[in-house]
């Protein structure tokens, strides 16, 4: 009897730290993530500087756990929906800007491409609800 | 004409800034002090005339003389505040502290409701100076800093902090980067604690919190290991009691559980670069298993992706590469020696993850130090040479992807896991190396270059150019089969950690 109770206690204690780091940090309701440049439907020749806009929140280095701040991720031609319970993926269609960049030089092959911004928290998780920009389409000549 | 005369007199009085020739905008770098009274309208409501008189007296008896004393210039006073500029950031902060401390004395004899408390912000910035006002971004930031300051406090910007940190003996508490209204870039903010003792008090509070978390972690460890031991002893009774008492068993579980607190500590804004640990335990360190790679010439790159072009011949000198990615066990030895900045959670034989390039460099430097061997990160060329294992095909086993060859997403019959599998779960490549492709992304020494235009051909690391980001290789268990190709390459910010990033080490003969 005593042993089972001890075991139960140990289980609870062992899992405590996991419960403590639940994801989906809250973001201010009026947070707005948007593209300063390019605009939706723009036709661009060659490479371009993509500029990220953020209102009512701050941009910080990934790993910095300040309230109401995060860092940018640029999704290029990404089709999968954003999973709020996973870190933003890191691959060729999910570019990370964890050093706090607010712009990036982007070079894409000619054709139509979609762009979308997602703000990530210190551990690269989206906020809850996610702070994302509109998905825009650009055409590269 | 008359206003010009006034301006001349003002400037004459303050002893600087002669009237500039017409048309030229007088600009200069200045430390800007902005202060205002918190709860001014409440005080006015309480006692309009009394408050007004007291504020005017404070301005006359305290603020103006203190500013002059510190070689500053009062630019203007508003109903409830003032703006002053100083040539020296040290004087500006000193002046602010003097004002705040004097006000404490003045308020002491009054009931709480009648206290006049200033909030003060100090910023270093380029300003445009006119006869009776100053303008510029720097001024706005100073008043924003003042806006977020608590009553009785002085908040300074990062620019000011850099100038005064070693010159003014007082405490500074970093409040991190703050986004302030209508200013695009976040501003680094510090709170000035007039006496260093106050700093210790606030730090002690933080230490207490850390201690509390640590004790929770210890309880968890104790609970966990007790649980483990109970299970163990039960199992033993069932089998036989011949084996020695399992004392080493609970040990590994202690490292993981301590991680949450340590990780938090690592995120505090005090980096502790410790390059060479002076531990005399050098001989005890368990070095990673290494595999000698023979010299050779190979064709680096491919036509599958723009970043992998152009393919070029590279000559590789003999070197050794770790058999597996660095594991949690390897990493935690470095952490235990206080040479790596955090203790990793996870199984001992899982690859270490969530490390930045700088973390990986720290590990290699520590290992080289304690083992007295030339451990380092591999160059990108060495990595690809080792990953190809003497082949020139798309994957080391051929041009077609095969299930069950690498730990990548949708690559195996087993459902995608939350964690990478333990190191060495799949077949080694022809050079006998495991997990060269899939498992975890692996940092190499090279700075990121968007293609191989101008790359070295002697197998050395390509470190010229902007080094804000470094190369990662291998792809991870979260990437699909395309990323497993030995020629695949990607980049990531040098100082940023990400949950799929690990590394392996190389050794020069």
Image: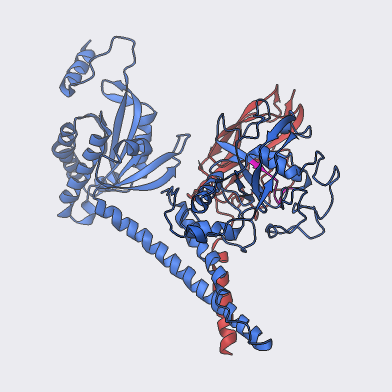
Chain colours: A red, B blue
Q: Quadrant of residue A44?
A: top right
Instruction: Tell which residue pokes out farthest to the bottom in this image.
Output: A1
Residue B188 is left or right of residue B12, and the answer is right
Point out residue B362 in the picture as x, y percentages from the top left corner: 51, 48
Point out residue A4 in the picture as x, y percentages from the top left corner: 60, 85
Point out residue B116 in the picture as x, y percentages from the top left corner: 22, 47
Of the 4 image quadrants, the one containing the C terminus of chain B is top right
Q: Nearer the viewer, residue B158 or B137?
A: B158
Q: Note whether residue B356 is visible.
A: yes
Q: State which region is magenta.
A: B472-479
Q: Note whether residue A74 is visible.
A: no
Q: How many marks?
A: 0
Point out residue B306 in the picture as x, y percentages from the top left corner: 73, 31
Image point 24% across, 54% down: which residue?
B113
Q: Is residue B114 above or below residue A7?
A: above
Q: Is residue B20 above or below residue B469?
A: above
Of the 4 image quadrants, the one containing the N terminus of chain B is top left
Assess whether residue B175 is covered by the magenta stretch: no
Residue B124 is left or right of residue B492, and the answer is left
Q: Nearer the viewer, residue B420 or B239?
A: B239
Q: Quadrant of residue A51?
A: top right
**Magenta region, main secondary structure:** loop
Residue B453 is left or right of residue B304, and the answer is left
């Amino acid at each position: 009897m005593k042993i089972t109770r001890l075991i139960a206690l140990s289980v609870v204690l062992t899992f405590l730290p996991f419960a403590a780091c639940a994801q989906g940090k809250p973001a201010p309701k009026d947070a707005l993530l948007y593209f300063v440049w390019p605009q939706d439907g723009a036709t661009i020749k060659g490479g371009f500087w993509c500029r990220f806009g953020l209102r009512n929140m701050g941009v910080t280095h990934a790993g910095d756990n300040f309230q109401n701040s995060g860092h940018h991720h640029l999704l290029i031609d990404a089709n999968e929906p954003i999973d709020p319970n996973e870190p933003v993926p890191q691959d060729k269609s999910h570019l990370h800007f964890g050093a706090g960049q607010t712009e990036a030089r982007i070079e894409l092959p000619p054709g139509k491409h979609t762009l979308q911004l997602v703000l990530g928290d210190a551990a690269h998780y989206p906020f809850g609800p996610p702070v994302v920009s509109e998905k825009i389409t650009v055409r590269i000549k | 004409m008359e206003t010009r005369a006034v301006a001349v007199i003002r400037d004459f009085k303050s002893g600087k800034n002669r009237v500039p020739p017409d048309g030229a905008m007088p600009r200069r770098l200045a430390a800007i002090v902005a202060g205002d009274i918190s709860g001014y309208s409440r005080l006015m409501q309480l006692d309009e005339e009394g408050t007004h008189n007291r504020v005017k007296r404070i301005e006359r008896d305290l603020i103006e003389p203190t500013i002059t004393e510190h070689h500053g210039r009062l630019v203007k006073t508003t109903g409830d505040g003032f703006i002053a500029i100083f040539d020296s950031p040290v004087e500006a902060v000193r002046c602010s502290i003097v004002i705040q401390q004097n006000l404490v004395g003045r308020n002491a004899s009054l009931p709480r409701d009648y206290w006049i408390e200033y909030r003060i912000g100090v910023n270093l910035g380029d300003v445009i100076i006119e006869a009776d006002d100053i303008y510029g971004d720097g001024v706005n930031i100073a008043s924003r800093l003042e806006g977020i300051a608590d009553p009785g406090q002085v908040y300074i910007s990062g620019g000011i902090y850099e100038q005064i940190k070693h010159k003014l003996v007082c405490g500074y508490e970093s409040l991190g980067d703050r986004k302030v209204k209508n200013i695009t870039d976040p501003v680094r903010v510090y709170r000035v604690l007039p006496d260093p003792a106050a700093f210790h008090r606030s730090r002690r509070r933080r230490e207490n919190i850390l201690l509390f978390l640590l004790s929770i972690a210890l309880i968890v460890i104790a609970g966990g290991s007790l649980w483990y031991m109970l299970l163990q002893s039960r199992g033993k009774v069932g089998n036989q009691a011949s084996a020695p008492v399992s004392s080493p068993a609970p040990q590994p579980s202690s490292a993981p559980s301590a991680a949450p607190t340590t990780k938090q500590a690592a995120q505090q804004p005090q980096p502790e670069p410790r390059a060479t640990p002076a531990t005399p335990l050098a001989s005890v360190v368990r070095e990673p298993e290494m595999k000698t790679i023979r010299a050779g010439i190979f064709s680096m790159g491919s036509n599958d992706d723009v970043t992998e072009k152009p393919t070029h011949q590279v000559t590789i000198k003999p070197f050794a590469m770790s058999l597996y990615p660095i594991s949690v066990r390897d990493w935690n030895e470095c952490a235990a020696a206080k040479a790596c900045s955090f203790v990793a959670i996870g199984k001992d034989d899982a690859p270490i993850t969530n490390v930045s390039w700088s973390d990986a460099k720290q590990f290699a430097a520590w290992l080289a130090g304690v083992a007295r061997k030339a451990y380092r990160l591999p160059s990108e060329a060495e990595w690809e040479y080792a990953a190809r294992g003497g082949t020139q095909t798309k994957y080391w086993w051929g041009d077609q992807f095969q299930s069950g060859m690498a730990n990548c997403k949708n690559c195996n019959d087993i459902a995608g896991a939350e964690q990478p599998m333990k190191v060495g779960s799949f077949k080694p490549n022809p050079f006998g190396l495991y997990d060269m492709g899939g498992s975890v992304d692996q940092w190499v020494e090279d700075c990121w270059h968007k293609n191989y235009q101008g790359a070295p051909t002697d197998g050395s690391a390509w470190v010229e150019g902007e080094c804000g980001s470094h190369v990662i290789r291998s792809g991870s268990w979260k990437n699909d089969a395309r990323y497993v190709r030995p020629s695949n390459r990607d980049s990531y910010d040098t100082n940023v950690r990400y949950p799929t990033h690990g590394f392996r080490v190389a050794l020069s003969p």
